[in-house]
């Protein structure tokens, strides 16, 4: 007997009554997905280092009717992660049902020129930071009875991208981490999936455009365009909601076909 069998299809994507925590919510993909979750009915906690910005964005989102909170978070600091988790749980009186683990930094530089400090900076945010935030959130979700974690990785973690050695390695690590987490946490009803955007027009992506890579990159995308943060909303809602209830350990690309281009 299937649960929800008689409900309208769209109801499975409804996030009313859910709390979604988003890291990297001060700009780009994280901010857009936080707004999309709020539009789907969720309360949202927007987390990033630019505290004023997340607070202002939270105020805008409250106009949609739910609750929203801007929270200071630096994922390179264990203390900051613990404080943010504490603040979120105190404010909403519950643990997050969904974590969108989206904080990230990019480095576009030839492999031979990347310094140990630059390597550390990328791994510290994209892998260590994502690991620790997911670990702290998962522990709270286990206690609460379940949840969904969306690790925002990248197609650069699936296929090699030139000048993206430390970035690609961090995202490949995050994809692998997502699979191990999915395996270990399924028994606690916590689902974990990796969402892998291709080229999405944001502040981060501007670096590629400024470096003059636009034409070459677009040619490698079968759909012949860069994506927008809006292009990620459907996949994120699927992974966040009841609609994706049998999905865990998936590596979901949203890339206009970039990872299946012809040899
Ligand atoms: N744009 C693309 O083409 C693309 C493709 C694949 C994957 N992605 C991934 O998508 C995610 C979002 O990127 P974006 O394109 O939206 O770029 P973005 O606008 O630069 O967003 C990056 C976000 O990460 C946050 N962040 C950076 N360091 C942080 C730290 N130490 N602690 C907490 N938050 C931190 C930033 O906020 P603060 O500076 O305020 O802390 C910002 O909100 C990243 O993980 C990125 O790797 C992007």
Image (tube, grey):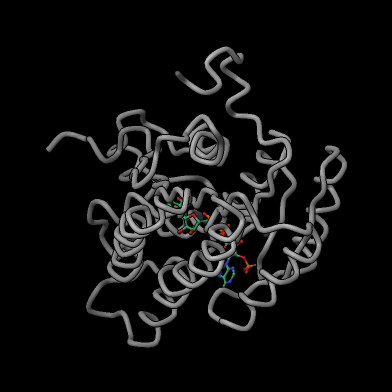
User: Which residue of the protein is positioned furthest toward the front in this rendering?
Assistant: 1
User: Residue at image x 28%, y 80%?
Assistant: 113
39 sits to left or right of 223: right
Residue at 57% across / 54% down in the picture?
99
Quadrant location, the C terminus: top left
In this orientation, which residue lies closer to the viewer: 3 or 93? 3
Quadrant (top left, top right, bottom left, bottom right) of the N terminus: top left
Q: Quadrant of ligand 1?
A: bottom right
Residue at 31 percent of width and 65 percent of height: 173
Q: How many marks?
A: 0
* Image quadrant assignment for residue 252: top left
Q: Can you give x and y, in whole percent of width and height, for residue 141 in the image? A: 57, 57
In x, y percent, where is residue 112? 22, 78
From the top left corner, tell me how far across and down residue 255 is, in percent. Answer: 38, 38
Measured as percent of width and height from the top left, residue 81 is found at 61, 75
Residue sticking out furthest to the bottom: 116
- Between residue 211 and residue 161, name the one nearer to us: 161
Position of 223 relative to 142 (above/below) = above
């Amino acid at each position: 007997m299937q649960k929800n069998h008689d409900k309208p299809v769209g109801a499975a994507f409804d996030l009313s009554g859910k709390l979604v925590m988003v890291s990297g919510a001060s700009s780009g993909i994280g901010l857009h997905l936080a707004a999309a979750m709020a539009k789907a009915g969720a309360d949202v906690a927007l987390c990033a280092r630019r505290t004023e910005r997340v607070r202002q964005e939270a105020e805008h989102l409250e106009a949609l009717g739910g609750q929203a909170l801007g929270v200071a978070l630096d994922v390179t600091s264990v203390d900051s992660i613990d404080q943010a988790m504490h603040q979120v749980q105190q404010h909403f009186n519950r643990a997050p049902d969904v974590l969108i683990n989206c904080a990230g930094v990019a480095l576009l530089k030839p492999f031979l020129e990347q310094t140990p400090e630059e390597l550390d900076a990328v791994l510290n945010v994209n892998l260590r930071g994502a690991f620790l935030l997911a670990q702290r959130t998962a522990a709270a979700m286990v206690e609460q009875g379940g949840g969904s974690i969306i690790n925002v990785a990248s197609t650069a973690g699936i296929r090699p991208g030139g000048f993206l050695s430390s970035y690609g390695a961090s995202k490949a690590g995050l994809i692998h981490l997502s699979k191990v987490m999915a395996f270990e946490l399924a028994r606690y009803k916590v689902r974990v999936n990796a969402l892998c955007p291709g080229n999405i027009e944001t502040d981060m992506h501007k670096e590629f455009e400024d470096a003059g890579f636009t034409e070459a990159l677009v040619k490698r995308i079968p759909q012949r365009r860069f994506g927008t943060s809006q292009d990620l909303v459907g996949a994120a809602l699927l992974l966040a909601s009841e609609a994706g209830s049998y999905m865990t350990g998936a590596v979901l690309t949203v890339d206009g076909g970039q990872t299946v281009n012809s040899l």
